[in-house]
Amino acid sequence: MGTPPNFLHLWDDSFLYVTPAIQSGLTARSSATLLASVSGHPFTLEGIDGTRVRCAAALIAPHVPRRLDVEGCGLLSLNLDPASTAYRMLATRMGDQGIQPLDARRFGRLRDDFEPVQYGALPDARVQALSIGMIQSITESPLLAARIDPRVARVIEAIRKHAGQIPLRELSAVACLSPDRLTHLFAAQVGVSIKRYALWTKVRLTVQQFTRPRKLTDVALNSGFTDAAHMSRTFQRYFGLAPSFLANQVQVTADAQASHAWGRTAACA
């Protein structure tokens, strides 16, 4: 069937990157990442200490540096927003393991959809169902809508609305908490600091804008970066890919919820 293209499916609290191959340098990001080989053949993960792992599936905790080498087997890379229910449920499974190899057999019949999703043969709703099913196969329970503290929820909304560019004192006013109290509550609820979530918001807003053609400079400014070079450096550090690669070599789609939650800054530009 030839070499499949690269796909990126965006939802409100997660996104799925599908690629036939990738060799990345050292990357780390604020999302938890669930990796699965399409063919079932192993790929290689290397930690910052040089430890190498060969596996067909893995769970990677936020901010864990790693190199990734996928050649010939295809890859599903599911990234979960730190504020999502799925992230919080998986966090209890990760413990202290930064890179946790998984038995790919736990995906069961879900693996029947791995090759179709790689070739773009699944409708959007089924791709999302596949992603949810992959998470549930790890948590071994349905994804329940665990409520986040409403004060933290208001802060998350404010950070997204302002593309991460909002001072802590203003966020404290939004939450009706002192800066110190908000800092501790946010980290306890979300699992990452406000500063790191603000940077993740910029990256996520950037990704959202590639659903249609845009100039990289406009994308950078709309996402809260100082310029396109700053955006590119951040992307390389997070994903090992340049934004221009995403713009030119990846088919990006987003559902209505993702467009509403992450399209505000771009829509106001």
Image: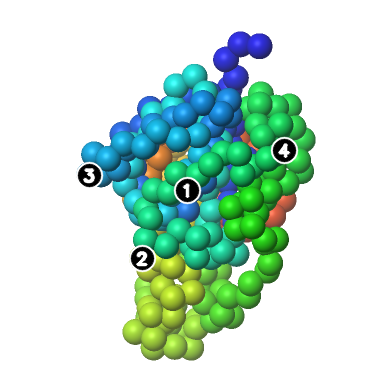
Q: Residue at x 61, y 44 (%)?
A: 106
Q: Residues within 10 Å of mark 3 (few under 14, many from 20)?
A: few
Give the CA separation, mark 2 to mark 1.
Answer: 24 Å
Q: Which mark sits nearer the N-terminus, 4 or 1? A: 1
Q: Is residue 241 left or right of residue 20?
A: left
Label 2 sits on residue: 195
Q: Which mark sits nearer the N-terminus, 2 or 1? A: 1
Q: Secondary structure at mark 3?
A: loop
Label 1 sits on residue: 59
Q: Residue at x 51, y 39 (%)?
A: 57
Is disc 4 in contact with disc 1, using a CB cutoff of under 8 Å? no
Q: Is residue 167 left or right of residue 42?
A: left
| Residue type pointed to by label 2 | Lys
Q: Position of residue 157 (x, y in %)?
A: 55, 69
**Front: mark 4 or 1:** 4
Q: Which mark sits nearer the N-terminus, 3 or 2? A: 3
Of 217 and 49, which appears nearest the observer? 49
Is disc 2 in contact with disc 1, using a CB cutoff of under 8 Å? no
Label 3 sits on residue: 49
- Quarter of image, res 109: top right
